[in-house]
Image (spheres, rainbow, N blue to C red):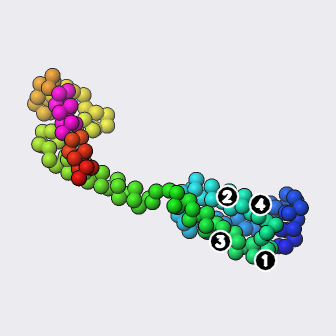
Amino acid sequence: MPTLVTASLSHDSLAWDELVRRYAGLVLFVVRSYRLSRADEEAVARVVWLRLVEQLDRVPADTLPVWLAATTRAECTRVQRLRPDESDEVLRAASRHQALRDALEMLSPADRDLLTMLAAEPPCPDVEISRALDIPISSVGPARVRVLATVRSYLVGQAAA
């Protein structure tokens, strides 16, 4: 391996390619242990190889695997600090879903049915809503506005609490 490092320092692209081929698995193994996104994994690997290019003349050949693993861990940790924790995002999403369920629970059954029909994919036409809820078709639009405003007000109040 010292000859690969020496040859790479002499701008031998074949030696550099072999060095990368030999240790790419180590870098990938360390990166994957951090459970980053695929894009972050690729970004970390690029940074690690760039740092090696920049510091190859200062890394003793016999410590190269240790240096690569340590540099990869440090970069993964840096990326994790910059990215929001996925578990935090999952908790926020769960909280938003629960607040929406709570808002729906406070509605009357007719208003809940209206929202359900509006949320259908594709949304139910006003004429079907009118028939299903036994309300005049001219009342569907104002009812929609009123119910959505009620839910929005509830959710804003919950967010402020």
**Residue 130 spot, x, y in % from top left:** 15, 28
Q: CA distance from mark 1 to mark 2?
A: 21 Å
Q: Earlier in the sequence, mark 3 or mark 2?
A: 2
Q: Earlier in the sequence, mark 1 or mark 2?
A: 2
Residue at numbered disc 1: 62
- Residue 128 visible in the current orientation: no
Amino acid at circle 4: Val
Q: Is 39 located above or below residue 138 in the figure?
A: below
Q: CA distance from mark 3 to mark 2?
A: 13 Å
* Number of residues whose C-alpha sits closer than 10 Å to that of mark 1, classed few (under 14), some (14–19) or many (20 or more): few
Residue at numbered disc 3: 70
Q: CA distance from mark 4 to mark 1?
A: 16 Å
Q: Tags 3 and 4 in contact by the CB under 8 Å rule?
A: no
Closer to the camera in the image, 73 or 37:
73
Q: Earlier in the sequence, mark 3 or mark 1?
A: 1
Residue at numbered disc 2: 47
Q: Residue furthest bottom?
A: 62
Q: CA distance from mark 2 to mark 4?
A: 10 Å
What is the number of the mark on residue 53? 4
* Number of residues whose C-alpha sits closer than 10 Å to that of mark 3, classed few (under 14), some (14–19) or many (20 or more): some
